[in-house]
Image (cartoon, coloured by chain):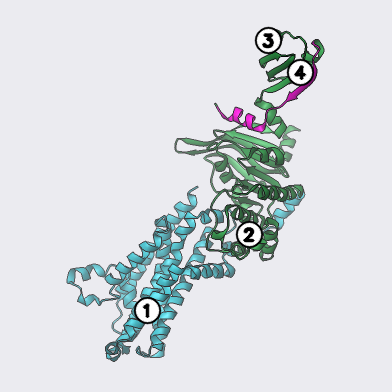
Chain colours: A cyan, B green
Amino acid sequence: MSSTTDAALTRQLPKYGGFSLPLILLETKRLLRNKRTMISVLLMPIILSFLFTSSAKASRKVVGVGNLSAFLVVSIALYGAVQAASFGGSVISLERVAGWSRQLRTTPLSATAYIAIKTVTSLALSFMSLAAVFVVGILNHKAHMPAEIWVACAACVWIGSLVFAVFGIFMGYLVPSENAMQFIAFGLLLFSFAGGLFIPLSSFPHMIREIAYYTPLYGLDEIVHYPLLQSNFDVVWLLNAAVWFAIFFTGAVIKFKQDTKRV
Amino acid sequence: MADRQAVLRKESAAIELCGVHKHYGKVKAVNGLDLSVSKGEVVAFLGPNGAGKTTTIDIILGLSEPSRGSASVFSMTPRRAVSLGLAAAVMQTGGLLGDYTVSETLQFMAAVYGKKSSVDAVMERAGIARLANSSVKSCSGGEQQRLRFAMALLPDPELLILDEPTQGMDVEGRREFWLSIKEDAALGKTILFATHYLEEADNYADRIVLVKKGEIVADGTPMEVKSLSSDKTVRAHVSSVDKDVLLKMEGVVSAELANNKLEVVCRDSDMVARYLLLETDAVNLEISLAGLEETFLNLTTN
């Protein structure tokens, strides 16, 4: 009889609700094993980066403190990074369908630790995507900008991808099936065009441009190119990113709470 | 004195459910269930589909909150007992990720519980060591069930909850599984299992709890439960007997005599046997108990 009581006394809850490095490594390894994810997170951006930066014309054109090729590398890096970050969180929908989330609720892993692990693995994925695009861009010898600007742009892209890590988690709870990934890929493509990632916003008609300013990739797109362009920094960019972060975060928290209450 | 006993019983209880109700809108999944399981008991939880078994198990695991009433596991909230690894469960379906390998799944759980060293040990115990590097989706239903079992063993729980644990296993697999469970039971672990295989309940449980429409309809040893509703059959060789006397006895359903062979279907077989042996020349008297299956049907239908 007393053995159970003793066992209960010596048993301890894991630190940080179960958030730990081994879990992050296992989860990252699993994400990297998914071929579909790898194609959209690594392969696609690498090919795009190669294609966009190969043009001699773009290489000759001076943009800010570098050239147009460098500008395009940063654009593609942002596209790849937000895609990677979103995918990292969207796997939650698969895990819910598989009953894994439910299984985890019979363990000490806290729901907050679970989300934290998803966020960190999403950021690991976006880092890999961005690193791949940058390495291809640099090795291609067409993109030029000062070394510290490369670093600054990379840092902006990576930090900015957090907005979409949260977006992915939100979608993971919102879209209840395997379709979450396709849904996200389509959404990001729209956001990318609207945010001016592929075609400069100045070439859009006035009315579409007015709407584009409110879409979630507009602010990030301007911020990540700022170190290269060094034009006037517009607080609206930060505001755009912050508001969208707040929207995704709130949405994720609401859906997450509903999910944990659910039977 | 009675109070003291109640307190003692409560302290040593692995599971304590008091007046648990669980309603989903108008559907009453669990309807005032009282259940106290002592430490070391092996309890089979039986009932037809939709009787509230899984809902009750969810409540014991802290996956679901009762609408009314209270649930505690080792005198703490189910959620806390589960978090401390005191209670662990083998779920009926799902709960696995296909793109992990067997060993990775267990490494994940080991990291969650902070028990790195036990992965090999539980794979060995669940008989899946040779599958360590197979992906979960390539495992058969029975193999996945063993993996779920290994996962439940990781925290070295005091209470094991098994929801249809042998589903998808072949006969040999089921036998091995129950041998393993018996080892745990011998170590004084508490086990509560739901199953469709009634002979598993009959063979391995100390106690059977039968639920119907969210309420307990029978609770006792397999023998007690079987004797509950079931009509028993008394057979004997007898040269002559007054059937009317037999039929007037309480609980006698039928009495047939043919070629000196008497067959009486009744509730109180002792009374019938006593009468036959004392008042008639009956010989070769034989009493047979209905199987658990018949009892189950009797108690849970109509």
Q: Secondary structure at mark 4?
A: strand
Letter of the chain that mark 3 sits on in the rendering:
B
Location of residue A92 with respect to A132 vertically, above or below: above
What residue is shown with label 4?
B236
Q: x%, y% of residue B156?
A: 69, 56
Q: Are marks 2 and 4 in contact (CB under 8 Å)?
A: no
Same chain for mark 1 and mark 4? The answer is no
The span shown in magenta is B280-301
Q: Residue furthest front?
A: B259
Distance in Å between CA atoms under marks 1 and 4: 89 Å
Of the pair A182 and A113, the residue shown nearer to us: A182
Other residues around mark 2 within 10 Å, as few (<14) / some (14–19) / many (≥20): some
Identity of the amino acid at label 3?
Answer: Lys
Q: Are marks 1 and 3 in contact (CB under 8 Å)?
A: no
Distance in Å between CA atoms under marks 1 and 3: 92 Å
What residue is shown with label 1?
A47
Q: Is residue B300 magenta?
A: yes
Same chain for mark 3 and mark 2? The answer is no
Which is more foreground, mark 1 or mark 2? 1
What residue is shown with label 2?
A13
Q: Residue at x 62, y 34 (%)?
A: B210
Identity of the amino acid at label 1?
Answer: Ile
Same chain for mark 1 and mark 3? The answer is no
Q: x%, y% of residue B88?
A: 63, 52
What residue is shown with label 3?
B248
Which is more foreground, mark 2 or mark 4? 4
Which is more foreground, mark 1 or mark 4? 4
Q: How many marks?
A: 4
